[in-house]
Image (cartoon, rainbow, N blue to C red):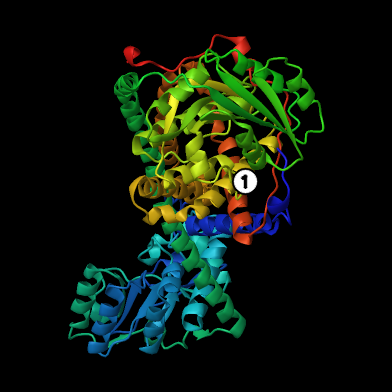
């Protein structure tokens, strides 16, 4: 259908795609950086086995080394002097306790800090500095420099300097290599790493062997833990040690920490913000991925369980209808058509072949520029009338049809829909209950031979039709599809007919009926075949209109959330469901996909793949059950895994585009799909699938 006026397109939004393309790389970088700090990316988790000892010149038991080409220069603490060193941290629990302990004993120490922890707790770094202690580097993440790549090794040292500059405005040339204790543990690949660090100006600090007593002069190595606290307290209580000091003070050397320059401090602040954002984002995404996966799995379980409830209610529902009597009243069928020459004849003839014979078929020609009106008028059946109007859009075409309708039961269909012979009769039977204002039929995909058609076929069965079973049980059906729906004329007139306030006139109409106190139900046995988009461009345009129109309808009927009766039930159940599963979750889907891909590539791949396969199995089981309920063959399930890698992402992007369009207040026009008359393709190919009956259960 075409449209004018209130839904004219002003300027389609474009900038948000640029924003998304910029955001995703930033998110990917944040995840990679967070993964790097946790050793998931370019990991340096374990130390290589030693293949050669350290040079003899370094193996004299001295804990302080400067590596040279010919060996090493070493140094030892003077007698009765102890240098306390603490590795790792700063730790928010134990570092303050260690500082209090040192202050109580009027002692100073050297803290070898992780760069990542310094960036996370800059206030502790500043306190360490302010209380006169010395700060050294323990690398950025504690990665083993002997097994790390040269790039990682360089970053481990340089990023620590940047973090210290941002946290406390200093640089340091003191270094302790992670996974080492005494000097002789700097063997094999560790010695190569120590030599590279010395070339950059670092003084390496190991620990004195435990066989050397504190009065002889020692460098002791402790951690930011309860054990480190107890051991440090024990040493500080040793009466044979006269001086507890830092490494450089104990050696009588000038301090190896210096003020950072202004550019270095700015870079450090940026690193702290980057790390904070990346860490927060990674944690948030972990929760979001878990919540999203849990909600998606819960939705599938809920759909299956409530579909089962729907099936069990069928017998009771049919018994109630028999008590009310069969509906045999005449029916007016409204067929709005704009340039539908490819399929309008098949649509009308399928209606004329219905077992319900008392029909008035109104083909409303909405200013078509092709042979639509000519073809419909040439069918030659007195039950068919062609009504002409200038091109005004589908809602106004339906309103025009309502003015010409003679019957109290109105059926609205699309001009590309082909009805089963018994579909019309089955569709109107629920209207025997006067409380029911509208009935949704069962729409099936006709042109499903290609992959895109199969994906949409699965979506119709698993998503739309299974959803409708759930919506009926919960009494919150949000949409009677334009392809096949029956209405009471008095219910339509009570809400003012078909509104053109939104681009999803079927959703708007259904929601208005709920708010007027009329129930809406689903009749799965009323089967009609429709033609779905055959190209991704057509699919995008169709779903863009659907999603945008649904957003408009939800906003228009938002007051249903606080209303009572059927309107309130619909609002609190139906609108909440749509907002959560069709808007909120899809908006976060691209980010969640990036995080999931990160988990597969750099995290626990087996766990990530296991979770994905488990979710896929749940989807397959649910889809199989939905296909069985609809009388469809299970062989289509082979296309479901492939659907996860492109089709799902396309629909998520449609939601993003629609939400941005709605927020900007841009009006869209009707995006008409080019028809090819293939709605009955599947119908002609094989026997008609029938929904599962109660007796087969």
- Quadrant including the N terminus: top right
Q: Quadrant where the C terminus lies?
A: top left
> In the image shown, does 139 or 427 lie closer to the viewer?
427
- Residue 600: horizontal and vertical position, in percent? 49, 42
- At numbered mark 1, what does the secondary structure look like: helix, strand or loop? loop
Q: Residue at x 58, y 75 (%)?
A: 267
Residue 430 is situated, as x and y percent measured from the top left of the image, at 41, 26
Residue 97 falls in image quadrant: bottom left
Vertical placement of residue 373 versus 119, above or below: above
Note whether 154 is above or below 431 in the view shown: below
> What residue does disc 1 label?
503
View extreme (top): residue: 687
Q: Give the percent coordinates (x, y) of residue 641.
A: 52, 29
Give the class, few, some or many, for how many residues have Cα within 10 Å of label 1's Cα (few <14, many ≥20): many
Report whether residue 485 is seen.
no
Q: Is residue 685 left or right of residue 65?
A: right
Q: Position of residue 74 (x, y in %)?
A: 44, 75
Can residue 655 be seen here? Answer: yes
Q: Residue at x 53, y 71 (%)?
A: 271
Instruction: Give whichever of 265, 230 is nearer the camera.
Output: 265
Q: Nearer the viewer, residue 78 or 618?
A: 618
Residue in the foreground of this view, choosing between 195 and 134? 134
Q: Is residue 553 left or right of residue 369?
A: left
**Residue depicted at x 40% and y 74%:** 121
Name the residue at 57% across, 67% down: 69
Residue 328 sits above or below residue 16 on the image:
above
User: Image check: 431 left or right of 586?
Assistant: left
Q: Is residue 88 left or right of residue 414?
A: left
């Amino acid at each position: 259908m075409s449209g004018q006026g209130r839904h004219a397109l002003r300027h389609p939004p474009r900038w948000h795609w640029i924003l998304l393309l910029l955001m995703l790389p930033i998110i990917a970088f944040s995840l990679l950086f967070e993964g790097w700090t946790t050793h998931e990316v370019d990991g340096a988790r374990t130390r290589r086995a030693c293949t050669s000892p350290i040079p003899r010149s370094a193996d004299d038991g001295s804990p302080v080394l400067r590596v040279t080409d010919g060996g090493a220069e070493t140094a030892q603490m003077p007698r009765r002097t102890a240098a306390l060193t603490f590795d790792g941290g700063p730790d928010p629990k134990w570092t303050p306790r260690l500082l209090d302990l040192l202050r109580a004993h009027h002692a100073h120490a050297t803290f070898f800090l992780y760069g990542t922890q310094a960036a996370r707790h800059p206030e502790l770094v500043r306190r360490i500095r302010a209380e006169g202690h010395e700060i050294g580097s323990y690398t950025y993440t504690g990665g083993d420099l002997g097994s790390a790549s040269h790039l990682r090794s360089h970053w481990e040292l340089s990023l620590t300097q940047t973090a210290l500059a941002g946290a406390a405005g200093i640089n340091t040339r003191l270094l302790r290599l992670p996974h080492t204790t005494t000097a002789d543990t700097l063997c094999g690949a560790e010695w190569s790493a120590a030599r590279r660090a010395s070339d950059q100006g670092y003084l390496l600090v190991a620990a004195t062997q435990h066989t050397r007593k504190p009065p002889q002069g020692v460098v002791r190595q402790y951690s930011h833990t309860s054990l480190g606290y107890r051991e440090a307290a024990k040493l500080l209580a040793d009466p044979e040690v006269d001086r507890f000091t830092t490494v450089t003070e104990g050696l009588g050397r000038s301090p190896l920490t210096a003020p950072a320059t202004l550019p270095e401090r700015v870079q450090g602040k940026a690193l702290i913000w980057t790390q904070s954002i990346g860490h927060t984002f990674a944690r948030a995404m972990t929760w979001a991925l878990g919540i999203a996966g849990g909600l998606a799995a819960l939705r599938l379980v809920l759909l299956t369980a409530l579909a089962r409830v729907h099936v069990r209610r069928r017998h009771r529902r049919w018994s109630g209808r028999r008590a009310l009597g069969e509906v045999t009243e005449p029916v007016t069928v409204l067929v709005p058509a704009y340039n539908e020459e490819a399929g309008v004849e098949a649509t009308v003839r399928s209606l004329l072949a219905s077992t319900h014979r008392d029909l008035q078929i109104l083909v409303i020609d909405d200013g078509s520029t092709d042979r639509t009106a000519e073809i419909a008028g040439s069918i030659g059946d007195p039950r068919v009338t062609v009504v002409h109007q200038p091109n005004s859009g589908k809602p106004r075409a339906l309103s025009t049809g309502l003015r010409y309708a003679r019957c109290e039961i109105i059926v609205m269909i699309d001009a590309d829909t082909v009805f089963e012979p018994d579909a019309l009769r089955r569709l109107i039977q629920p209207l025997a209950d006067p409380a029911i204002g509208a009935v949704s039929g069962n729409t099936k995909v006709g042109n499903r031979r290609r992959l895109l058609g199969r994906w949409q076929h699965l979506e119709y069965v698993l998503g739309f039709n299974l959803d409708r079973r759930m919506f009926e049980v919960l009494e919150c059906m949000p949409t009677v599809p334009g392809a096949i729906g029956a209405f009471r004329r008095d219910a339509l007139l009570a809400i003012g007919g078909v509104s053109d306030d939104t681009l999803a006139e079927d959703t708007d109409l259904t929601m208005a009926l709920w708010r007027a106190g009329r129930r809406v139900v689903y009749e799965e046995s009323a089967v009609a075949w429709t033609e779905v988009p055959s190209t991704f461009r057509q699919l995008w345009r169709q779903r863009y209109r659907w999603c945008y129109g649904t957003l408009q309808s939800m906003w228009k009927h938002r007051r249903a959330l606080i209303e009572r009766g059927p309107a309130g039930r619909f609002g609190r159940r139906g609108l909440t469901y749509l907002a959560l599963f069709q808007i909120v979750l899809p908006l976060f889907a691209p980010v969640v996909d990036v995080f999931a891909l990160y988990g597969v590539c750099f995290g626990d791949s087996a766990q990530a793949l296991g979770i994905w396969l488990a979710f896929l199995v749940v989807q397959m089981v649910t889809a199989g059950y939905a296909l069985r309920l609809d009388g469809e063959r299970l062989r289509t399930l082979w296309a479901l895994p492939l659907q996860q890698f492109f089709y799902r992402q396309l629909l998520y992007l449609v939601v993003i585009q629609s939400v941005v369009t709605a927020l900007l207040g841009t009006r869209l026009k009707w995006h008409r799909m080019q028809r090819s008359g293939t709605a009955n393709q599947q119908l002609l190919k094989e026997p008609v699938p029938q929904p599962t009956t109660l007796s087969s259960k």
